[in-house]
Image: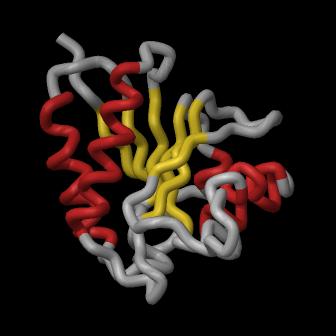
């Protein structure tokens, strides 16, 4: 029987081969740091345009914490990219929100049979207040229902300690 794999990797996430990518940005949806800035640099302003479309109402300058948006631009190697908001405007992270985001993204990937691998950044860490070890705990717990599944492999990518 195959089992779900969780791999930890120290690398730049934009260089990791996977079918899906999960990362977090800020409530303003500005790709100014971390993974978002790397995606913007590598794939161009079209990545920012995906997020700008989420600010639909006149005068709206931010989205709710816990939001999850999808969007891939030409040239990206992933079939699905989950742009998530894991921190508030002061970059504080609520573990319950992070858990909800992880659960949503894993469920979406499980339902999409074209997804064989998912790369996660440590959402809520880095620019957020969550510790890396706490994110690992949440991710590990949320992977438990998939333990005896060969649905996909999950890679947790970290390019710096948080």
Q: Quadrant of the N terminus?
A: top left
At 41% from the left and 50% from the top, the residue drawn is 156
For this orientation, the residue located farthest to the front is 58
Give the left or right position of residue 89, taking residue 134 as reference. right
Q: How is the image coloured?
A: secondary structure
Rendered location of residue 44, percent (x, y)? 85, 54
For this orientation, the residue located farthest to the top is 1
Where residue 130 sits, quadrant-wise, is bottom left
Does 146 appear above or below 50? above
Give the left or right position of residue 161, taking residue 133 as reference. right
Give the left or right position of residue 52, taking residue 93 as reference. right
Rendered location of residue 150, percent (x, y)? 29, 18
Report how many numbered discs are placed on residues in the image. Answer: 0
Rendered location of residue 72, percent (x, y)? 68, 38
For this orientation, the residue located farthest to the right is 44
Q: Nearer the viewer, residue 134 or 85?
A: 85
Does 67 appear above or below 86? above
Where residue 162 sits, quadrant-wise, is bottom left
Q: Nearer the viewer, residue 105 or 155?
A: 105
Rendered location of residue 61, percent (x, y)? 63, 74
At 61% from the left and 62% from the top, the residue drawn is 35
Q: Nearer the viewer, residue 45 or 16?
A: 45
Q: Nearer the viewer, residue 10 or 27?
A: 27
At 81% from the left and 34% from the top, the residue drawn is 74
Give the left or right position of residue 80, taking residue 153 as reference. right
At 23% from the left and 16% from the top, the residue drawn is 2
């Amino acid at each position: 029987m195959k089992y779900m794999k969780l791999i930890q990797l120290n690398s730049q996430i934009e260089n990791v081969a996977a079918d899906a990518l999960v990362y977090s940005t800020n409530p303003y949806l500005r790709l100014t740091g971390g993974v978002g800035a790397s995606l913007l640099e590598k794939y161009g302003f079209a990545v920012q345009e995906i997020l700008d479309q989420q600010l639909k109402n006149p005068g709206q300058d931010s989205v709710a914490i816990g939001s999850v948006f999808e969007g891939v631009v030409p040239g990206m190697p992933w079939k699905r990219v989950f742009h998530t908001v894991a921190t508030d405007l002061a970059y504080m992270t609520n573990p319950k929100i992070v858990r909800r985001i992880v659960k949503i993204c894993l469920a979406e990937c499980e339902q999409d049979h074209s997804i064989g691998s998912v790369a996660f950044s440590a959402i809520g860490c880095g620019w957020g207040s969550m510790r890396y070890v706490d994110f690992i705990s949440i991710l590990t717990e949320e992977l438990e229902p998939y333990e005896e599944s060969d649905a996909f492999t999950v890679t947790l990518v970290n390019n710096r300690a948080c």
